[in-house]
Amino acid sequence: MSYFLLIILLPLTSSVEGQKEFPDNFKFGVSSSAYQIEGAWSEDGKGESIWDHLVHNHPEKIRDRSNGDVACDSYHLWHRDVEMLKELGVDTYRFSIAWTRIMPTGIGNQVNPKGVEYYNSLINALLANNITPYVVLYHWDLPQRLQEMGGWINRDTIGRFKEYARFAFETFGDRVKWWTTFNEPVQICRESYEQDAMAPGYDFPGIPCYLCAHNLLLAHAETVQLYRLHYQSSQGGKIGISLSSAWAQPRSDSADDREASEMNLQFIIGWFAHPIFSTNGNYPQIMIDRIGNFSAQQGFAKSRLPTFSADEIRQIKESSDFLGFNTYTSYMVHKLDEQNANIFPQPSFNHDSGVVEYPNTSWPETASSWFRVHPKGIYNLLTWIRREYDNPDVFVTENGYSDHGDMRDTNRVEYFKKYMDAVLDAVGEGCNVKGYFAWSLMDNFEWRGGIVERFGLYYVDFNHPNRTRTRKSSAKFYADVIKKRKIDMELMPEPDDYTPYSAAEAVSTRVKPVIIAAMIVYLYKLIY
Ligand SMILES: *[C@@H]1O[C@H](CO)[C@@H](O)[C@H](O)[C@H]1NC(C)=O
Ligand SMILES: *[C@@H]1O[C@H](CO)[C@@H](O)[C@H](O)[C@H]1NC(C)=O
Ligand SMILES: *[C@@H]1O[C@H](CO)[C@@H](O)[C@H](O)[C@H]1NC(C)=O
């Protein structure tokens, strides 16, 4: 009987396991971003960004009043970063260029050679180690000077961005073959202008976020057009954008709750993806209708959602060779109804979208208030993208877990097991997922979460003057996935040994010899 079962089960399990392997051409990477790791915020001619400005002028907005002045000090310690990437065995490293490091004011008349040298060194070291650079042009650190001219609300910023991008293509494009214009436009426009959650930190709902998004989409499309016309054929690279969303889990199976989920995804993903990746282009019709109707009711002369010309719609459509997608979590959703009609200000993005999001307390918590673990979410999102945009090439450009810095980070390992397994489920059903980037290479400055909320595969000792990096369990786990191209559900590696550096200890080791010397002098005097 048992033999009989074994004979039946063996081929079944092995074929299931076989399906669960990552495809041969699947790329593994890790992600980081300039402001979160580089430090050296004003060194060697770097200019001030809106994040430098925010942390210096409003330290109270950061959970632990920390900042990115030094962060992981990657500006000086990038050799060690490359060593870590080799230890992990990644195919590719996704990092961003700090606009203000190569153009201090953000304006193209002034270029900073030291900044250019830094990125050249990093790119060359990656290539020498067979690691593909995957470069993001804009990961939230707008030059402060441009913010003083209105930032992304000012149409002039489109041209400034294009000038910066052109310089990057000219300077690095002989070696960089993967470009991303913007990382997470939703955070850039909604959390920065609509809600005071990101730099520049405005709390002005319902109007500027749509203007920001409009200019950002135009900047993206014009930059891609520039790349395609002048660089793509000679340099042979690809260019895209990284969008982001949580999965919107309907509160129930009711038609209303399912519609709420769809509305949420159209407002968060569709806002940027529909103009670029849909057949017809332009904003999702549901945004045009809802914002148009509410604007009229609210006494606006025209819709708060700006209008694209037919030429602009054509220009933005298909302006991406791939879709980068970041996701971490899910929310429960239902429609804004009469009982909770007044929870959002009018006008506001949330009121326009008409959806209430709330956490599901049965999903495990993390160190970040917005973040609970729900692996099915990433599968649902990849499937939704496949259906909605005719199965584009997708890279999961960020996915990871936050804790308070455990080196034996078993929860992070479990998170990666389940989320990567869910990615494999989506791949198995035909989603064109081409790669996966874990967030993040190492603990870093987590924006408003300071250094309290840690996402690293490597532990970073922020008290140590050398910002020592140590392999956590998750770093060894991820290296194993990359090596075997499948997920070992049983594996829980031990982290490397490390005793965190304490400033008090450092003082006592410096003070001890002084005390001993003083005692010797004292004894000497006593005797003679
Ligand atoms: C209001 O919404 C309807 C569809 O529900 C649409 O046909 C109409 O154009 C919208 N009105 C405005 C002012 O946008
Ligand atoms: C939380 O999610 C579970 C399924 O994952 C569901 O059964 C439950 O109803 C949800 N709870 C709330 C409060 O929505
Ligand atoms: C930091 O690194 C430098 C250079 O490698 C070394 O000389 C120094 O001792 C280190 N500092 C500490 C506190 O370990």
Image (spheres, rainbow, N blue to C red):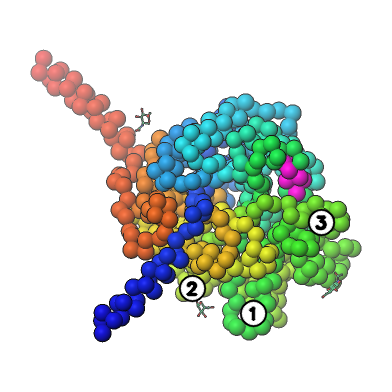
**Considering only order in the chain, which callout, 1 or 2, is on the residue closer to the N terminus?**
1
Residue sitting at x 26%, y 79%: 3
* Cα separation between marks 1 and 3: 31 Å
Q: Depth-wise, is mark 1 or mark 3 nearer the camera? A: 3
Which region of the structure is painted magenta? 221-228
336 to the left or right of 429 = right
Magenta-colored stretch includes residue 348? no
Residue 70 visible, this angle: no
Label 1, residues with CA under 10 Å away: few <14, some 14-19, many ≥20: many
Q: Mark 3 belongs to which amino acid?
A: Ile
Image side of residue 190 versus residue 496, left or right: right
**Secondary structure under the numbered disc 1 in the rendered image:** helix
* Lower sequence index among marks 1 and 3: 1
Residue 200, image x, y percentages: 66, 48
The span from disc 3 to disc 2 (Cα, nearest Å) is 41 Å
Ligand 2 is within 8 Å of the C-beta of the residue at disc 2: yes
The residue beneath circle 1 is: 257
Give the residue number, with chain letter if any, for mark 2.
361
In the depicted structure, whether residue 359 falls above or below residue 148: below
The C terminus sits in image quarter? top left
Which secondary structure type mostly characterizes the magenta part of the structure?
A: helix
Under circle 2, the secondary element is loop
Foreground pick, 129 / 10: 10
Q: Residue at x 73, y 51 (%)?
A: 319
Question: To which residue does mark 3 refer?
Answer: 313
